[in-house]
Amino acid sequence: MWKGAIMFDPTVFDNLKVALENELYDMDNLDHRVRITGRVDRMELAVMSRLFRIQFQLPDDDLITGEIELAASLQELASEILEQKGAEPGCVLTIRYKMPISNPDENCPQMQQVMEKIWPDQMLTQTISYVYNPEKIMPILCTSEISFPRKINEEQMNDIPELALYAVQTIQELRAQIK
């Protein structure tokens, strides 16, 4: 070994990212419960933050896309790497679902009900968007987002399999509710 070599110690972000990624890829490759459709692993150099996002759908249905996002700010990363006294490094976890809907007044309350049942006590936000085209009626896209009230860290590592199951269950129930 080279004299003076420094051992790499993964951050909370790295450990959580690997656990989430492994869980969802196992659900894709081994269990065939989901199909991974997108993945982002980014270091934002402008603000020195980290972002990991993984998208998935049910294997036989591409109507709804689920997305789990993990983010860590420079403050979080620096406090951990520099071992700042009293710092409790963690990451922000967000879960999103994107799906086309036909009637926001009917579909959004249905989606809200499904989300509140599976994710009680979490902050839920729904955003509706569509591309304006006077020539043609365009689909309305609803993005439902679950925000957690606190940062997560390695103490929640054992919760990741259950979180992934709930994320998939949400797509299944949204699909059954919104036809």
Image: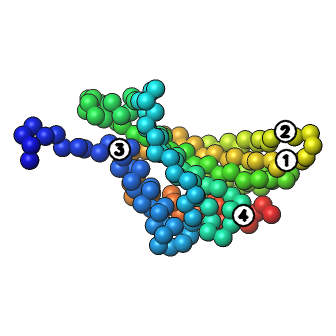
Which residue sits at x=23%, y=43%?
8
For label 4, count other residues whose C-alpha is less than 10 Å away and answer few (under 14), some (14-19) or many (20+): some
Q: Which mark is residue 138?
A: 1
**Residue type beneath disc 3:** Val
What whole-number distance in Å separates the C-alpha atoms at marks 1 and 4? 20 Å
Residue where numbered disc 3 is placed: 12
**Residue type beneath disc 4:** Arg
Which residue sits at x=64%, y=56%?
65
Residue in front for this viewpoint, 85 or 100: 100
Element on which disc 2 rests: loop
Element on which disc 1 rests: loop
**Vertical side of 124 occupied by 64: above or below:** below
Element on which disc 3 rests: helix
| Foreground disc of the pair 2, 3 | 2
**Residue type beneath disc 1:** Met
Q: Which mark is residue 34?
A: none
Q: Is residue 21 visible?
A: yes
Q: Quadrant of the C terminus?
A: bottom right
| Residue 139 percent across, percent down from the top left | 82, 50
* Quadrant of residue 50 within the rendered picture: top left
Dot 1 or dot 4: first in sequence order is 1
| Residue 154 percent across, percent down from the top left | 36, 49
| Foreground disc of the pair 1, 3 | 1
Q: Which mark is residue 175?
A: 4
| Residue 70 percent across, percent down from the top left | 48, 44
Residue where numbered disc 2 is placed: 132
Count how many numbered circles sit on residues in the image. 4
What whole-number distance in Å separates the C-alpha atoms at marks 2 and 3? 42 Å
Disc 2 and disc 3 in contact, CB within 8 angstroms: no
- As drawn, the residue found furthest toward the top would be 46
